Amino acid sequence: MATIIQVAEQAGVSTATVSRVLSQPDRVALRTRERVLEVVQALGYQPNVAARTLRTHRAAKILLTVPDISNPFFASVIRGAEEAARDAGYAVMLGDTRHDPEVEDQYADMLSRREVDGLIFLGHRLPASLAPLLAREGGFAPVVNGCEYSPNIGVPSVHIDNAAAGSDAIDHLVGLGHRAIGLITGPEISPISRDRLAGAMRAADRHGLGGALQVQVGDYSAESAFAHMRALIERRVTAVFCFSDEMAIGAMRAIREAGLSCPAQVSVIGFDDLPLASFFQPALTTIAQPKGRIGRCAVELLVALLGGSEPPARQVTLQHQLVVRNSTAPTPRAP
């Protein structure tokens, strides 16, 4: 196996220059950098990451925590983050917090111990153990939030405008003639659920339906939506807006088991646009989030902080899209 000394000798530079080319390439002249990299490739040199970490106190690792790793929504976010991290020279460590504040703190402690260089958390809570770090480093603490958004968190964030997305869903259903509309939300503690609900309520007010929406509080799971949809069917809703595609699946099953047809008798709209949404029966109308882009952008913000730079934006709002498929249709005519 080639050594850094062999690379330096063949490239005609010092070992320090080789090290700078591999760790801080912007500090090396372009021609020298290209010559060193050619030799590195020719010899198949692999730097000793462990030794470099001890010298620089850089772990070359990013910790990404998710509240529920079984939720397929997060898979695309994780993939986007991993691709961006790899391009920037970082590996990604993944932590499943299961909505448990104690587990969130345990993972966050890895940052305090310098086992990772930065943290991206996809939940709605800032781990309490990070408070001393944020107090010490302020806006340059290597912590970024993705997906969820609360202005009180105090760290850079990547998200969509969930209130606008909730409004778009109701506008779509009302445009099809629906007036008896049900909502199955996420947990009340979730900022994105509250924002989607607020946007839906504002849209209902615009259409003269203030107070008419039938609201059920779910937990983003198909199981919770199945139970809540049965209650909404009893209230004779003609459409339901579910705050996740998983809940839309549960709602569709409840509609079928009640002997009703989607969308002929009850329209369903979801949220997230999971990869399988277009393969549902019927294909699901939903709000699409740029899942991979959320992950990539979160890493880009974090890498800027790790480089000592102010991120290009503290709060990044990405575009969502209403994707209309076959699960929504005009309201059924009264017999």
Image: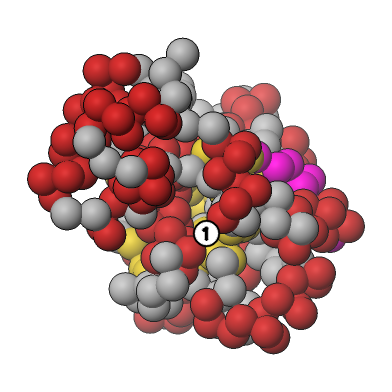
Residue 158 visible in the shown view:
no
Residue furthest toward the top? 1
Q: Residue at x 73, y 42 (%)?
A: 96
User: Looking at this view, is 126 or 49 the one in front?
Assistant: 49
Q: Furthest residue to the right? A: 102
What quarter of the picture does the C terminus occupy? top left
Residue lying at 69% horizontally and 86% vertically, measured from the top left: 135
Q: Is residue 245 a member of the stretch shown in magenta?
A: no
Q: Is residue 98 magenta?
A: yes
Q: Position of residue 252 (x, y in %)?
A: 57, 32
Q: Which residue is mark 1?
A: 146
63 relative to 216, above or below: above
Q: Is residue 144 left or right of residue 101?
A: left
Q: Which residues are magenta?
A: 94-101
Q: Which of 197/176 is in front? A: 197
For the image, the number of numbered tags is 1
Q: Residue at x 17, y 54 (%)?
A: 29
- Quick check: 137 left or right of 110? left
Tell me if residue 205 comes above or below residue 130 in the rendering. Answer: below
Q: Look at 58% across and 66% down and name the residue there.
A: 143
Q: Position of residue 311 (x, y in %)?
A: 38, 73
Residue furthest toward the left? Answer: 31
> At which x and y percent is residue 238?
50, 49
In percent of width and height, residue 155 lies at 56, 75
